[in-house]
Amino acid sequence: MKRYLYILLLVVTLGFTGCSDFLDRPSLTTMNDETYWTSEATVRLFANGFYTNYFTGYNSGYTEDYAPLRGYYFADDFASSGKQGGFETQAPASRASASEGASWLLSYAGPTWNFSWVRKSNLFLERIEAMKDKQITGSVYQHWSAVARFFRGYEYSRLVSVFGDVPYYDKVIKDTEKDLMYKDRDSRTLVMDKVYDDFVYVLDNMRTSDGNAQFLNKYIAAGFISRFMLFEGTWQKYQLNNTEKAKKYLDLAVRAGALVMSNSAYAFTSDFRSLFGSQDLASNKEMVMYRHYDAAIGVMHSIASYSNLYESQSTSPNLKLAKAFVCNDGKPYKLSAVANANQLDIKNMVATRDPRFEATFWGAPKKEAGTLLYACKFIDREGVKQYPGPYTPMYGSSTNTNDAPVMRLAEVVLNWIEAKAELATMGGATVSQADLDASVNAIRKRPLDATAIAKGIKKTEPLTLATLSDDPDRDADVPALIWEIRRERRMEFVFEHTRLMDLKRWKKIDYMKNTDPDNLLGLWISFPSEYTEWLVPSKVNKLKVKKADGTVVTYTGTNAADMVGYYIPENVSNRDAFTDRVYLAPIGNTQISEYLGKGYTLTQTPGW
C-alpha cells in the first residue's frame, strides 16, 4: 500500500470567477462556483490543489522552500565559513502574503503570515457541507470533510509553530465581516484544541484507502498528525509547562503513530540511501507517502545535483553532529568499546559509526563543503560516480528525477516512541523494551546495500533498557532514554525538516548560540596525508586546524607536517547574539498599521 504523490497538471484555485453581469450564459473558460460542485470527481480535483503546497518533497526546479538540504540547513547541526547565518533582529516592515504559493521563513522553518490556505480549506469544507445528502452522502461525505479538515489542521499547525498565537477561522470570512476579518490573535492553545478536534475527526472518518495509492488516506494523515501533535505536546510541556495539554496532544500522537504501525504494508525493508536517491519509490515499503518526479512531463528538481560532490554545500555538517552518531555497538563514542571509537576523522567514523553515517556523508574531505564533510544523502550511488561531471540530467542542474520521501515510517515510529517516553515522565505507562524494538531498533535493523557491505559497515546494536547508556554529554535536564531517542532523530533526519523544530519544541534553541566549540569545527583531518591539495600558497594564513588541547595552528607555508587537527572553516565566526524571543516570529509593522487604520488592534509577538 505505497503512497505515490499525484503529479498535478491542473490546480484548482482558491476561488472561482462567476459570469460577467452582461452575459446571459456561463463562461466557457472560467470555473463557476455555483456549477462546479457536482460530484465526488470535482471534490477530488479541488483537493488535489493542496498537494504540492503540503507534500513538497524535493520541491521543483530550483525552488528550495520546504526541501531538504537546500531549505532545511538552519540548525545547530551545521556550520559554514565566515560568519554564521543569524536570526532576524527586528520586526519586518511587512510579513503578509495573499498568494497561494508556498511561503517560507528559513529561520523558523515554516510559513509567513498568510491565511490564504486557511481560507481555501474552509471554502472546501463549506462546499462539501452544501453537497451533503445531495451529491455526496454517507462515507463519501465523511471522507472528504476529513480531507478538508486535515488540510486546515495542517496549515494551522504550521502557522502556530512559527507565530504562536494566530487568529482562528473556521469559515470563509465575508468582506463585510470586519470584526472577524480584523480580529486579534487567538491563543495557540485555543487554536491547537481546534486542530486537535479536526485531527480526531480525520482519524475517525478518513478512508483507509481512497481506491488508489496516489491519494491522501487515513494512514498518510496519521503520519502527519503524529508529527504535529508531538510538536505541540512537547511545546506545551517545555515552553508552557501545561501538563494537561501536553498529555492531550501527546496521547493523540501515540494513537496516530500506532495506527500507521499497525499496517503491515509498511516495513523497514530498504537500505537508508535508497530512501532518498531512488528513481522510483513505488515498491519501497518504508514510504507512507512520496512524491514522484518524471522528466517526461517536466516535473523535476535540483536536490540531487547539490549532493553530486561537485556542487557546493557552503553550510555543511559540523563536528558536534558527527559526534552525536553512535558507534555500531550502540554506544556514544565516549562509552564505546569499538576499536578507535575516539578517532574522529571521516574515514574512521565511516568505519565505526551507525550505518547512516556512511550513507549520509562522503567518505573523504571535500573542499565543496564548508566544513569539508559533504552530504551525499540525496543522490544514489551511481550519481556520485559521475563526479566531476559531465552529469546526466538526473544528477545535474534542475533536471533531477529521483523520488522524494514525503512521510516515512521512520518518522512515524520515532514520533510515536518519543511521545510515549514523554508521557511516561508525566505519569503515563513506562516505555518497554518491546516499544523500543518496534521503533528505534526496527530502524537499526534496516538492510545494508552492497556498497556499505563491501566497505565492512556493520548494523548498529539495538537500544536496550537494561544497558541504556548514560552519555557524559547528556543535558542534565533530559532523562537518558529521551536523550537517546533525540539522538536517533538527529542521526535519521540530517538535512531534513526536523532539527530546528526539535530544538524549539524542546526549548533548546540555546544550542544555536554555539557555546560548544564543536559547533564551529569540522572533523579531524591530517592535511599532509588526506588533503595535500590545500597545502598551497593561496591557503597561507587562511588554513587552520585545532589540536586536541585547543591549540590553533595556522598554515604558514612551511609547517605542513603540523597541519593535523580539527578543521576550522575559513574565517569562521559565531552568529549574532539572540534571545528567547526567536522561538516565535514577529509579524510585520505594516500589518499592525493596517489593523489600526481600520480601528482594530493586531498584537505583536511577545518580545518583538
Image (cartoon, rainbow, N blue to C red):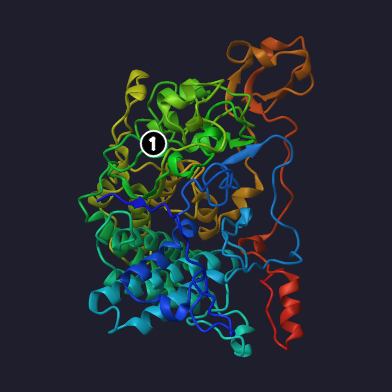
The answer to whether 569 appears left or right of 54 in the picture is right
The answer to whether 373 appears left or right of 337 in the picture is right
Along the viewing direction, whichever of 562 and 20 lies nearer the viewer: 20
Along the viewing direction, whichever of 68 and 535 lies nearer the viewer: 68
Mark 1: which amino acid? Gln
Residue shown at the point (37%, 55%) measured from the top left: 415
Along the viewing direction, whichever of 464 and 4 lies nearer the viewer: 4
Secondary element at tag 1:
loop
Q: Please tell me in which quadrant of the rendered image residue 258 appears.
A: bottom left
User: Circle 1 sits on which residue?
Assistant: 279
The answer to whether 444 appears left or right of 320 in the picture is left
Q: Is residue 204 visible?
A: yes
Where in the figure is residue 321, as x and y percent of width and height?
53, 38
Residue shown at the point (70%, 43%) measured from the top left: 84
Where in the figure is residue 462, as x and y percent of width and height?
29, 38
Quarter of the rendering occupied by the C terminus: bottom right
Q: Assess disc 1: are there few (<14), some (14-19) or many (≥20) residues with their C-alpha within 10 Å of its C-alpha.
A: some
Where in the figure is residue 105, as x and y percent of width and height?
62, 57
Q: Is residue 549 visible?
A: no
Picture layout, residue 492 above or below residue 37: above
Q: Please tell me in which quadrant of the rendered image residue 574 appears.
A: top right
Q: Please tell me in which quadrant of the rendered image residue 17 appears.
A: bottom right
Where in the figure is residue 308, as x and y percent of width and height?
53, 28
Question: Total number of numbered labels?
Answer: 1
Picture layout, residue 508 above or below residue 520: below
